[in-house]
Image (cartoon, grey):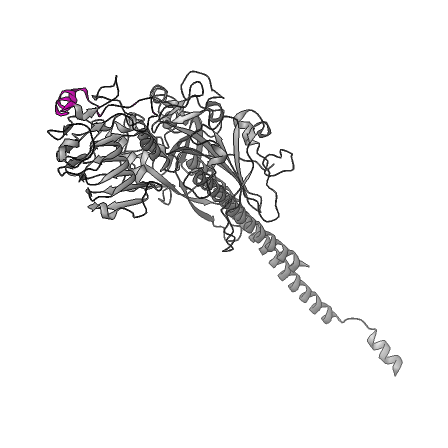
């Protein structure tokens, strides 16, 4: 009797048992790999967004720093005689177009720059290069940045045009009609470039690749505010 | 195992995002910490600040800060040592920026003993901002890398001065008359996460108010088509015996000049030559209008640029208003002046409207009136009175009061209150027909008004930093 029982327990799995086991293993493994694949895709998608977020973050930080330094050194840093004859040695906080510097313009009306997608600040950001025009320009979906030396009587838009290089890609503001730059002014002052007190920056940046799961492009929206500290002359 | 991999990936992803946000937050915090350092440095430069560091910057009252002098305010966290003079590579707070500006290490400068920050409020257990040090230095053409006088050479020895409008280079170590020395305030902040930001102000005592020290006459009628009307009679002795016009006098002799060394300015100054005839004709009897030998009692004077245009004067009034001890809006009188005002505690008072200076009291400091100043010469004032706006002074009553210091009258607004277009000022007027003891010029009182104003920021910049 004992011998029969031992023989029975040592028979191994039946075909049905093997089939059931294999099916169960396949299902469980499939689920596990499906979860893994899904998480990998999600990781890839989130990585794209994180990278976009970081790039936009750096861009806003740089714009903020440039606006902070706008107008340095001011006209009062020079003797009046030198300031009158060499306006390239001091910085107005903001340059404008058209008709810089002969005639100022009204932001939102007669100014092309500063505008919704264009900004030019004047600053001496280091000790070696004198006062520079630092221009941001959204062209298509690329935010460009260019730095050119400030020149007497020159047009800041034309002077910086040859120096513009891509700074941030896939900026979707124009397609969504959201200005990159908007402005606040000194209390009670007219809306001319020299009276700009704060620059509000909004960036809608789209990921370069579609989300692997949804096949949709994802966007990140960042906003920042930069204050002008230097006098408006 | 698979689930562990998934979890790890998600944790890493969340961690990366969190770290990025922390970095940004930390960088922003460092910026505002550094800015707070600048403000502490600027505030403590002011002689009226209870924790003033004026003695560190300017060891002798009124002295010029030597080009090689350096003053630090340090702000270590608990148990931390902040020594910007330790230029070893391991010191995160070493001041290498000084060498960038001055061309020599800070250890070669005349560094004053380090001063501790007062930003933390220990009693209330309020931690201060996390800036590490603030450095105060004079400013030269070389340190600012700017050729102020356009001579093609960046002077590293002579300090720069600010006259309310422009920066000027001193010559032969003599300060520019009537101007304030320009100082540079630099602050470094380092957060616990390692973010570093360095920012810099240039500042000057009084800022635009530095121009006040250059008032060129006892009574300055600033503008075009100005008018003056004095008492018809008077003995010109200014003895204040209360006999109305008989004691009236505008005296340009400096009452603060040392004995035996007379100096002074014209009694009445005007700025448009075409007004000379009328003002001279009105200043009679001439014995009432005195000036030192060789100086006309009534004459044309030149003013700093900021005092020459409506917009310049308007910016001056705005600058003073921002730093005034008291701003009165609408019609006001002597009773609205602070009771704590005294010779030891002069104040800056701005009246945005008409002001009636009356009573038997004395005011001290700087009085700015944008409307009409109605002056009853029972009252006195020691300091400077500026009537800028409507530019009208009326005084028809008698009394023995005197204005010691100087008076400036300028019309910058039309009858509707609109600012006049540059560059022409309007028709300011000064009328004092009742008497009183008039105006006694005092250069010390005029000069001291500048000290009533805090150091004004002339410019700001951020200095790029890399983690050492």
Residue B63 lies, with reference to residue A44, above or below; the image says above
Residue at point 26%, 21% (across, down) = B292
The quadrant in which the C terminus of chain B is found is top right
In this picture, which residue range is highlighted in magenta? B259-286
Where, by quadrant of the figure, is residue B103 drawn?
Answer: top right
Q: Residue furthest left?
A: B232
The quadrant in which the N terminus of chain B is found is bottom right
Residue at point 20%, 44% (across, down) = B359
| Number of on-image labels | 0
Residue B418 lies, with reference to residue A24, above or below; the image says above
Residue B135 colored in magenta in the image: no
Left or right: A15 with respect to B188? right
Q: Residue furthest bottom?
A: A1
- Whether residue A233 is visible: no
**Picture coordinates of residue A101 (x, y %)?**
31, 26
Residue at point 22%, 25% (across, down) = B267
Residue B274 colored in magenta in the image: yes
Residue A3 lies, with reference to residue A30, above or below; the image says below
Q: Nearer the viewer, residue A111 or B204?
A: B204
**Picture coordinates of residue B398 (x, y %)?**
14, 38
**Picture coordinates of residue B71 (x, y %)?**
52, 34
Q: Nearer the viewer, residue B281 or B311?
A: B281
**Picture coordinates of residue B247 (x, y %)?**
17, 32
Left or right: B145 with respect to B11? left
């Amino acid at each position: 009797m004992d011998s029969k029982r031992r023989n029975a327990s040592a028979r191994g799995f039946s075909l049905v048992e093997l089939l059931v086991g294999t099916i169960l293993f396949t299902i469980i493994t499939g689920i596990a790999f499906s979860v893994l694949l899904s998480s990998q895709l999600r990781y890839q998608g989130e990585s794209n967004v994180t990278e976009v977020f970081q790039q936009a973050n750096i861009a806003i930080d740089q714009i903020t720093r440039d606006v902070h330094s706008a107008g340095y050194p001011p006209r009062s840093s020079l003797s009046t005689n030198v300031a009158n004859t060499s306006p390239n040695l001091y910085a107005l906080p903001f340059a404008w177009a058209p008709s810089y510097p002969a005639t100022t313009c009204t932001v939102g009306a007669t100014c092309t720059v500063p505008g919704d997608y264009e900004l030019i600040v004047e600053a001496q950001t280091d000790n070696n290069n004198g006062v520079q025009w630092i221009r941001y320009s959204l062209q298509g979906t690329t935010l460009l940045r260019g730095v050119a030396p400030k020149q007497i009587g020159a047009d800041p838009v034309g002077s910086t045009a040859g120096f513009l290089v891509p700074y941030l890609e896939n900026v979707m503001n124009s397609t969504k009609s959201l200005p990159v730059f908007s402005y606040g002014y000194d209390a009670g002052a007219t809306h001319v470039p020299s009276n700009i007190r704060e620059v509000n920056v909004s960036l809608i940046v789209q990921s370069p690749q579609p989300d692997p799961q949804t096949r949709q492009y994802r966007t990140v929206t960042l906003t920042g505010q930069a204050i002008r500290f230097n006098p408006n002359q | 195992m698979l689930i562990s991999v998934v979890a790890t990936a998600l944790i890493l992803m969340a961690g990366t995002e969190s770290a990025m946000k922390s970095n940004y937050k930390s960088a922003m915090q460092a910026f505002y910490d550094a800015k707070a350092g600048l403000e502490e440095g600027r505030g403590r430069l002011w002689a009226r600040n209870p924790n003033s560091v004026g003695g560190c910057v300017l060891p002798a009252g009124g002295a010029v800060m030597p080009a090689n002098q350096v003053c630090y305010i340090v702000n270590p966290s608990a148990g931390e040592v902040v020594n910007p003079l330790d230029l070893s590579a391991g010191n995160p707070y070493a001041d290498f920026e000084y060498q960038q500006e001055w061309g020599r290490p800070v250890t070669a400068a005349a560094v004053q003993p380090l001063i501790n920050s007062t930003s933390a409020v220990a009693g209330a257990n309020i931690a201060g901002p996390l800036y590490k040090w603030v450095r105060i230095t004079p400013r030269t053409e070389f340190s600012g890398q700017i050729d102020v006088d356009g001579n093609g050479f960046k002077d590293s020895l002579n300090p720069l001065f600010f006259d309310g409008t422009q920066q000027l280079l001193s010559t032969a170590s003599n300060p520019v008359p009537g101007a304030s020395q320009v100082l540079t305030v630099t602050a470094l902040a380092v957060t616990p996460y390692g973010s570093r930001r360095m920012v810099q102000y240039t500042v000057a005592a009084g800022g635009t108010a530095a121009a006040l020290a250059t008032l060129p006459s006892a009574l300055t009628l600033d503008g075009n088509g100005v008018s003056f009307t004095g008492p018809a009679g008077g003995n010109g002795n200014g003895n204040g015996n209360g006999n109305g016009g008989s004691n009236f006098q505008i005296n340009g002799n400096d009452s603060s000049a040392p004995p035996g060394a007379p100096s002074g300015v014209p009694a009445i100054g005007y700025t448009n030559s075409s007004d000379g005839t009328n003002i001279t004709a009105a200043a009679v009897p001439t014995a009432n209008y005195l000036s030192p030998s060789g100086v006309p009692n009534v004459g044309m004077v030149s003013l700093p640029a900021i005092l020459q245009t409506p917009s310049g004067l308007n910016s001056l009034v705005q600058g003073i208003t921002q730093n005034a001890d008291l701003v009165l809006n609408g019609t006001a009188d002597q009773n609205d002046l602070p009771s704590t005002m005294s010779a030891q505690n002069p104040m800056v008072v701005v009246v945005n409207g008409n002001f009636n200076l009356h009573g038997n009291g004395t005011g001290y400091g700087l009085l700015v009136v944008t409307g009409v100043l109605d002056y009853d010469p029972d009252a006195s004032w020691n300091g400077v009175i500026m009537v800028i706006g409507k530019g009208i002074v009326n005084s028809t009553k008698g009394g023995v009061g005197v204005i010691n210091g100087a008076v400036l009258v300028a019309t910058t607004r039309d009858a509707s209150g609109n600012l006049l277009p540059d560059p022409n000022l309007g028709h300011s007027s000064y009328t004092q027909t009742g008497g009183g003891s008039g105006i006694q010029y005092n250069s010390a009182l005029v000069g001291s008004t500048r000290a009533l104003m805090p150091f004004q920021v002339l410019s700001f910049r951020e200095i790029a930093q890399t983690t050492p």
